[in-house]
Image (cartoon, rainbow, N blue to C red):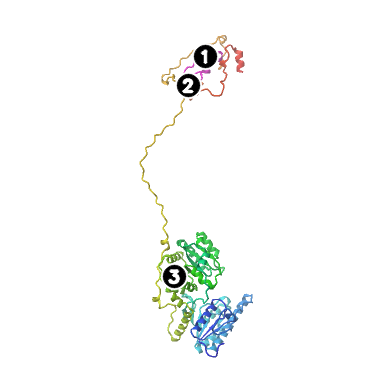
Amino acid sequence: MPSNDPVDILIQCPGSHGVIPDHVHEQASALQNLGLKILVLCCPAFLRSRNATYPTIPCMSEGATTNRTNAFARKIGKALQTVRNQLVFALEVYKNRPALVLSASHVDSQSPLWVWPHLLMILFRKTIYAMNLHFSNRDHHLGPKWWQKLGESLSYKPFRIAVAHKRLPSNNPLPKYIRTVEVPIGPEKTAQIRENPKKIRQKWKVARGKKIFLAFGHIRNHKNLDLVIRALLENPQAALVILGRVSNHRDRPLKYYQMLADDLGLSKRVYISDEFVPDEKRQSYFEAADFIVSTYSGGFHSQTATLATAANARRYVLASSGDSPMHDLVQHFGLGVFVEPDSSEAVADGMATLLHGDLPEANWEGFEAHATWETNVTRLLEAAADLVGGRPTPSRQFEGYEDEAVPLPTLLSARALLPAKPQKISKRKEPAAPKPRPVARKKPVKRLATAKSAPSPATLEAPTPVPLETPASLAMDPAQPVFPGFDAALETPSQQPALVNGVNGVNGHNKTSKNSEVGVSPKPRRGRKPRTRVADLEPTLDRQSIGAVAV
C-alpha cells in the first residue's frame, strides 16, 4: 500500500489482459528499476498473471458489459464504468500528488462528465499528464454527434505528452500542444527453452541447400505473404515457412496461400502450418530459419516484437511498411533489407539481396541496448523534462543521430541473377555436293504380242470382195427372204469365207475386241468349254431341223 509521501509517477490501467496492460507492466517495472517511486492503479485481475514488484491499488473496475445481452444496455454499462474509473483516477491523483501521471490509453467516452477534476489538478498542482497512444473503441459512445465531438476535444485537454509506438500521419487528431514521442518496444522477458534447429528444419520438410525465410505470428492480409510466395519464382534458392494462425475472419485463410503455392508450382518450397509455438520456444524456431519475413503493407505505421526476437537469434530481416518506427530501426542498425511495400518485384529483389548481396554487419548489440523498456520510459522522462524546461522534444527516435546509422545495403535485381535459359542454337549443315539425279525408269507397258506375219497398216490393201455362192436349196424360191444370221449356217465349213483382214463371223462382223490389234486372235478363256455353234452341226440339216435348233 502507498504511504502518505508523494509518488513520482502514477500509472492508471483499467484493463487486465491484452497488449496495453502488458506494456503498462513493462513500463512500471522499468521505471522502478530506474529508482523512481511508482504506483499503479489497476483492476484485481491485473495481478493474476503478472509478477509485479511495484506497489498497486486495485481500484479500477472491469467487465461491466459481460452479463448484458442488449446492445444499448452494454453501451450504458460501459459509459458508466468509464466515468466511475476516471473519477476514481482523479481522486487518487489528488491524494498521492504525483509529478507525472501516465494513462494506459486514450479515452474520450463521456469526457464532459469526468475531465474537470483532472483540469483542476493541472491548474493548481502543475501535474503533467502523459498517455500511451492507443485510441479507444468508439462502439460504446452514446449521445448525439455534437456531444461526441465535444467529448473528443475535451478528452485531450489534460494531456501534454503522447508516447507513440507508431508513426502518426500528418492528419492525426492530436492537438498541437501535445508532444508526440516515438519509443521502441522492448523484448519479451521469457525464459527460453532450447530446441535443436536441425530437427525443426526436418519438420518443415525443406529440401537441402534451400535458404529458409520464416514468417511467424498471426496471419493477416497486411503482411503481404502472397507477395512473398510470388517472389519465390525469381529466387529458386529460397523456401518459405509460414507458422501462425488466422485470428480474424476478414483475413485470408491458410488454404488460400497453399492453393497459391500449388498454382505457381511452388508447393515443394512453401511449408504452411498453424502449429502453436509457445513463447519459450520462439527463439529456437527463429534460429532454425535463415531469414525472417516482416513484409507489411504501406498502411502499417507501427513496429513489431519480431525485430527483437530476430536480433536475439542473429537473423537478418526482410521488412517493408509505410513510414514507421520499424523502418527507422531496420535501417539505423542494419537489421536487414527494407524494401518498397506492396510490390512483389521489390520483395523478390530484397530476397536476392539477402541471398547474394554483400550485407553490412548489423549492429546487434546497439539494437539490443536501444530496443528496451528502459529506453521506452527514458524517452518519456526526457519529454517531461523538456516540457518543464521549455525545450523542444525530438519526435523520432534517431533524430539527430543519423551519422551513427549502419550503411544501407545495395539492392540487387532478382531477375538479373536468374540463370539464363539455354538458347537452342540451330546447327546449319554445309550443303553437300549435289548427287547425280537417278534416271527415271519407265514402267514396262504390257502389250499384246503381234503376229510376225501381220503386215503393217501402211501396206494393207483394200479387201477384195468375195462373191458368196447361193445354195441350191434356196435358189428354188428366189422371192423368199433370207433369215439373217441363219443363212450362213446352211453353208458347209468348206463353203465359209476365209479370214479377210481379221474380219469374220456372221454378216461380216468382227468378233475380236476393239482394243486388240489387227490380225491378232484373242486368247480363249480358261476353264470354259467352247460354245456349240450352228455352223458346227451336220451339213445335211434341212430347214425344219434348223428351225428346231433355232427355237
| Magenta highlight on residue 481 | no
From the viewer's side, name the closer residue of 382 and 355: 355
Q: Which mark is residue 532?
A: none
Local SS, label 3:
strand
Within 10 Å of disc 3 (Cα), the crowding (few <14, some 14-19, many 20+) is many
The residue positioned 49% from the left and 21% from the top of the image is 521
Please report whichever mark, 2 or 1, sits nearer to the chain's N-terminal start. 1
- How far apart are labels 2 and 3 at the CA level? 108 Å
Please report whichever mark, 2 or 3, sits nearer to the chain's N-terminal start. 3
- How far apart are labels 2 and 1 at the CA level? 20 Å
Asked whether the viewer can see residue 88, the reply is: yes
| Magenta highlight on residue 508 | yes
Residue 394 image point, x, y percent = 43, 80
Magenta stretch? 487-509
Residue 275 image point, x, y percent = 55, 68
Residue 156 vertical placement versus 498 (above, below):
below
Q: Amino acid at mark 2?
A: Val
From the viewer's side, name the closer residue of 318 and 150: 318
Residue 322 image point, x, y percent = 46, 71
Q: Looking at the rendering, which quadrant does residue 46 occupy?
A: bottom right
Asked whether the viewer can see residue 177, the reply is: no
Local SS, label 2:
loop
Q: Main secondary structure of the magenta part?
A: loop
Residue 257 image point, x, y percent = 53, 63
